[in-house]
Image (cartoon, rainbow, N blue to C red):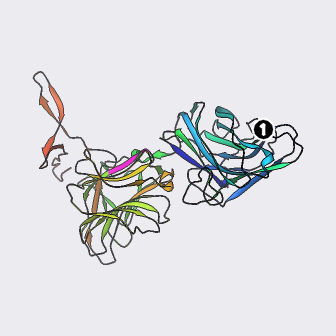
């Protein structure tokens, strides 16, 4: 699973005492967060080289959040950072050293990229400089370890004239910096690992809950959302409080999925009543959404910016065909999908994965809304990222063996749960 970080102008969460690259000049004090989303104002770090001999100059260090679990960071790395040289004669090329700290210590867990050096001279007009497919030295991370990126330049000139190299970092534009792009003050620079595999954020597929004994600590909820004890589901009201059931941690959808069962959408209410499943960063109006609209019984697939999608995809709501929903990201494409049984999925909408959906800071929120005074039966959601398996035992000729229970849905035999009476309720 590719994992992208951005060179932010936020403060580094921890700064190792020792600068590990082979820098002739390591006086730069720039230390920023290598964040899971862009952050901070556009900033620069400029340092001059003064040596007659070829020399290397550090421009800054960026430190990642702590690893959330143990695992091996391997594969390749791509990166793109804005840079500029004060003169063509400077003959600067990019130099990068990248390693992993053992937690918040000055101990090196392992080196990922050992004083890597590019071959293209820096331009005299600021632009993005990219490198792709650089092989990493694999490092076995422990929980709490951090990646450190040291970025600078190698001066390959041999003259006495002093030249200055400048790196750009920070910025929060909605497009990542690209190679040769002049948008260095708006589009953020970044680093992407091919094989981080959820080491630094939780894939959305790990939000798992059957609501068997209540609404678990995986979620926070409000606005009269409650656990339906009889049916072992989460019930989300449609009211003026925007009742909600939200994942209580930040997640990442890149290379992952998030699905669940919509047992029912609200009934009653008025033309303001709806339920929705949202995936997005902090509440900034940018999100993707399934929206179940009650008054005209439609299901809407939205990609909202400023809380609005001018051209959503809409289909008539079918409680059988659309019983299951799924957000999914794969190979740079994001999908909205539905299924009658969590087995056969239909793509309802897709798009090239935008920058913000690559953030490792996404949250899911199942919510409902209706104007004050509007009364509706709550929506019910169940089986988040899990499929209930109902089995029976049948005689194989020599033994009783477990088999899934299948029922005819009108077109095919599909696995379905069954319910039993516990003297007071069906469960």
Front-lying residue, 100 or 307: 307
Q: Secondary structure at mark 1?
A: loop
Q: Nearer the viewer, residue 422 or 338?
A: 338
Query: In the current view of this chain or complex, which residue is farthest to the bottom?
Result: 373
Query: Residue 156 vs residue 277: left or right?
Result: right
Residue 167 falls within the magenta-colored stretch:
no
Q: Is residue 396 left or right of residue 316?
A: left
Give the residue displayed 88% in from the left and 47% down from the top: 161
Q: Position of residue 298 (x, y in %)?
A: 26, 66
Q: In x, y percent, where is residue 124?
A: 74, 53
Residue 369 position, x and y percent, is: 34, 70
* Number of marks: 1
Within 10 Å of disc 1 (Cα), the crowding (few <14, some 14-19, many 20+) is some
Nearer to the camera, 410 or 132: 132
Please give left or right for residue 160 compared with residue 169 in the image: right
Residue furthest right in the image: 160
Assess whether residue 258 is covered by the magenta stretch: yes
Q: Main secondary structure of the magenta part?
A: strand
Left or right, 146 with reference to 369? right
- Can residue 400 be seen at all in this image of the molecule? yes
| Residue under label 1 | 23
Residue 143 x/y as whole percent: 56, 38
Residue 380's place in the image compared with 4, above or below, is below
Magenta segment boundaries in residue numbering: 255-259
Residue for point 79% across, 39% down: 156
């Amino acid at each position: 699973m590719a994992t992208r970080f951005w060179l932010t102008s936020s403060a580094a969460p921890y700064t190792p005492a020792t600068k590990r690259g082979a820098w002739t000049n390591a006086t730069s004090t720039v230390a920023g967060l290598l964040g899971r989303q862009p952050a901070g104002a556009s900033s620069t770090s400029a340092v001059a080289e003064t040596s007659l001999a070829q020399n290397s100059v550090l421009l800054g260090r960026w430190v990642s959040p702590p690893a959330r679990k143990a695992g091996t960071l391997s594969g390749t790395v791509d990166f793109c950072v804005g840079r500029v040289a004060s003169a063509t004669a400077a003959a600067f090329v990019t130099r990068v050293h990248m390693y992993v700290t053992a937690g918040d210590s000055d101990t090196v867990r392992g080196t990922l990229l050992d004083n890597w050096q590019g071959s293209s001279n820096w331009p005299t007009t600021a632009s993005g400089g990219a490198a792709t497919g650089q092989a990493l030295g694999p490092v076995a991370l422990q929980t709490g370890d951090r990646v450190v990126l040291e970025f600078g330049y190698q001066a390959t000139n041999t003259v006495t004239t002093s030249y200055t190299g400048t790196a750009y970092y920070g910025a929060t534009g909605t497009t990542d910096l690209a190679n040769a792009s002049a948008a260095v003050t708006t589009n953020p620079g970044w680093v992407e690992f091919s094989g981080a595999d959820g080491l630094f954020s939780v894939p959305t597929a790990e939000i798992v809950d059957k609501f068997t004994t209540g609404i678990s600590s995986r979620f926070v909820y409000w606005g009269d959302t409650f656990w339906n004890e009889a049916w072992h589901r989460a019930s989300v009201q449609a009211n003026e409080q925007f009742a909600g059931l939200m994942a209580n941690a930040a997640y990442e959808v890149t290379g992952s999925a998030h699905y669940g069962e919509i047992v029912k959408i609200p009934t009653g209410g008025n033309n303001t009543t709806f339920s929705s499943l949202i995936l997005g960063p902090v509440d900034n109006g940018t999100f993707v959404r399934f929206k179940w609209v009650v008054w005209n019984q439609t299901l809407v697939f939205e990609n909202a910016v400023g809380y609005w999608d001018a051209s959503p995809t809409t289909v008539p709501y079918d409680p059988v065909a659309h019983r299951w929903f799924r957000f999914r990201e794969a190979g740079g494409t994001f999908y909205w999908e539905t299924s009658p049984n969590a087995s056969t999925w239909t793509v309802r909408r897709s798009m090239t994965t935008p920058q913000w959906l690559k953030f490792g800071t996404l949250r899911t929120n199942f919510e409902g809304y209706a104007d004050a005074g509007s009364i509706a039966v709550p929506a019910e959601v169940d089986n988040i990222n899990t499929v209930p398996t109902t089995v029976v035992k049948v005689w194989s000729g020599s033994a009783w063996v477990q088999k899934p229970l299948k029922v005819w849905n009108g077109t095919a035999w599909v696995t379905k749960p069954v319910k039993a009476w516990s003297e007071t309720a069906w469960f």
